[in-house]
């Protein structure tokens, strides 16, 4: 039985981890704010929170994730491990950066950036360092052979007015849109989830356009 459990855990570790990074930003900050750090969350799916041999000890998967994630995402702070239904997650806090400077450079070369200016409403920028860190972790076989990265951004419309915008290729509140015009209700909110293609493009090229001003 112990051998079977070990084999199951090893299989889960080798198949990679689903990692979701999320942040929340106000529409006013996107439109007229200044560059600054903003709070973010990172949830990484793990095999289990506790050791099957001794529930008072952390599982081998949580130990590996605690060691690995800070080597990928700068300033990642481990908070806890928890289970929801039949899945377990390691929860970290990670900073994002809102980049309002139209200078062609990221506000932070170590963190995920949300970029907004008069030309484009919302881009996501992923520094080369994060991609290199992900590749190094995979090649060094830390027990996390691949990181399936997902990015969520909650936008709070605090303008008090309806706000029209264009979606390039993303999910808005769980619904897929491609080159679509939508409107955020005043004092409402919507969640932007990048498509797999957008995440891959941001990793490969450093940037991915998500939302734009509606003409």
Image (cartoon, rainbow, N blue to C red):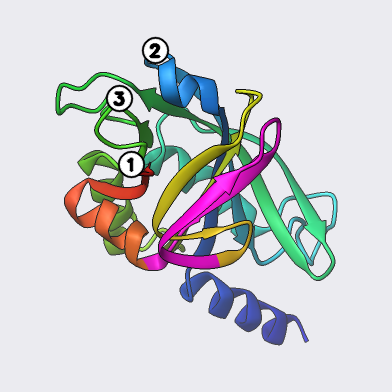
Q: Position of residue 76 (x, y in %)?
A: 50, 33
Residue that numbered label 3 is attached to? 108
Relative side of 166 to 164, left or right = left
- Residue at left offset 29%, top offset 37%: 120
- Magenta residues, start to end: 176-196
Residue that numbered label 2 is attached to? 34
Q: How crowded is mark 3: few (under 14 residues within 10 Å), some or many (20 or more)?
A: some
Q: Nearer the viewer, residue 11 or 120?
A: 120
Relative side of 178 to 19, left or right = left
Q: Position of residue 64 (x, y in %)?
A: 53, 53
Quadrant (top left, top right, bottom left, bottom right) of the C terminus:
top left
- Residue at left offset 52%, top offset 21%: 28
Determine if residue 145 is in view.
no
Relative side of 9 to 107, left or right = right
Q: Which of 207 and 162 is in front in this view?
A: 162
Of mark 2 and mark 1, the one earlier in the sequence is 2
Of mark 2 and mark 3, the one earlier in the sequence is 2
């Amino acid at each position: 039985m112990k051998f079977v459990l070990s084999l199951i855990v090893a299989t889960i570790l080798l198949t990679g981890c689903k990692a979701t990074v999320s942040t929340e930003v106000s529409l006013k900050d996107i439109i007229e704010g200044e560059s600054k750090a903003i709070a973010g969350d990172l949830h990484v799916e793990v095999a289990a929170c506790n050791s099957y041999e001794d529930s008072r000890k952390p599982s081998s998967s949580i130990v590996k994730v605690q060691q690995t994630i800070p080597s990928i995402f700068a300033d990642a702070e481990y908070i806890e491990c928890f289970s929801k239904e039949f899945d377990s997650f390691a929860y970290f806090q990670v900073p994002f950066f809102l980049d309002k400077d139209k200078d062609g450079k990221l506000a932070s070369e170590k963190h995920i950036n949300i970029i907004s200016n008069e030309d484009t409403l919302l881009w996501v920028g992923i520094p080369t360092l994060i991609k290199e860190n992900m590749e190094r972790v995979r090649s060094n076989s830390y027990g996390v052979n691949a990181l399936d990265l997902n990015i969520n951004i909650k936008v709070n419309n605090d303008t008090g007015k309806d706000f029209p915008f264009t979606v390039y290729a993303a999910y808005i509140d769980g619904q897929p849109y491609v080159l679509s015009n939508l409107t955020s209700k005043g004092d409402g909110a919507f969640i932007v989830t990048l498509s797999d293609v957008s995440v891959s493009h941001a990793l490969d090229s450093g940037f991915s356009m998500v939302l734009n001003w509606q003409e």
